[in-house]
Image (spheres, helix red, strand yellow):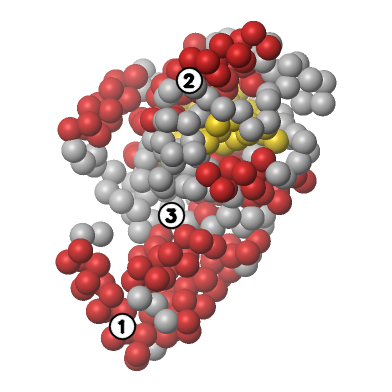
Amino acid sequence: MTNFTLKVTRLGFRVLQAISPDLAGRAAFRLFCRTPSPRPKGEKAKAAHAAGAARLAGAERFVLRLAGGAKAHAYRLNGGAIGQRKRYLVTHGWGSSAVYMTDLVSMLAATGAEVVALDFPGHGHAGGRFLHMGLAVEAIAAAGERFGAFDAAIGHSFGGAALMVSAGGLIPDAAPVTGERLVLIGAPSEMAWLFTDFGRMIGLLHPAQAVLENEVHRVTARRLGDFDASNTAGSIGRPILVIHAEDDKEVSAAHARRYGAAGNRVRLFWANGFGHRRIIGAPPVLGVIAAFLDGGVDEDAYESIKKDAEIIPFFDLPVRRAAL
């Protein structure tokens, strides 16, 4: 929000919650779930969007219909009956879309795998301007129903958190994401901090803040505190690669450390210097993802990746370790 918009918003909520904290909390939830315009802003964003759209020009496109009239959108590369191959799912972050994930998508497709890249509701070609975690997990489930079981899933930021919520089966009636392996890039480990920061930003008092947070339970049948993906990471029994940059200004590195402490099947890979967005397409990051999806990474390749990216590992990736 601009300073002027924020001042007007704070004034509006000051008046509304004086009249009805319940109405103020519900209105705050609608605002919280409102997604940014899908139109890129600025020359760099426009160039990145155009380049990504060109890369996906030949992909198959699908509409995934969700409960309540919401829609997700999916791109598929290497689709059709072309023999035995792996199938990967890719999910994007808040305010992003599949077109910004094309470095990753192209790398995965180059292995010969079938790759499905989602646009969540309110993003990309999905249409609308509304998204919450429940809808994101429904979109992931709809992708599994439409395309079949995935061998692995890779998500950035909000998309990584949605994969963990899905894998943990936290949303009733939404089938958990399949896949032997999960990759989380710059992903938050829990959501309470977002609601706290948002409420503080728009000036909510405690009664309206409580209503805002209770709206999560109304739309997902789960309390806000249930969405702690670091607990899920230790219980789902799958190998998880967590990639994060300590210079990430949007999602604190503390989230990555929480994941890293969740169990011995979680591997944390520091990609320092790539921030929150450049990390998605950084060549060393793509290299370690490819190695992880292939079953591990040999020691020489891992050392090369660390050297090229100046990456500091928290837990070393396994050298073809059977446990993963």
Distance from the alpha carbon under mark 1 to that under mark 2: 48 Å
Q: Is residue 245 left or right of residue 27?
A: right
Distance from the alpha carbon under mark 2 to that under mark 3: 34 Å
Location of mark 1 (residue): 14
Residue drawn at x 48%, y 42% is 157
Camera-nearest residue between 172 and 6: 6
Q: Quadrant of the N terminus?
A: bottom left
Residue drawn at x 57%, y 36% is 184
Q: Residues within 10 Å of mark 3 (few under 14, many from 20)?
A: some
- Percent across and percent down for residue 34 are 35, 58
Location of mark 2 (residue): 309
Residue drawn at x 43%, y 23% is 282
Distance from the alpha carbon under mark 1 to that under mark 3: 25 Å
Q: Amino acid at mark 1?
A: Arg
Q: Nearer the viewer, mark 2 or mark 3?
A: 2
Camera-nearest residue between 180 and 319: 319
Residue drawn at x 35%, y 76% is 203
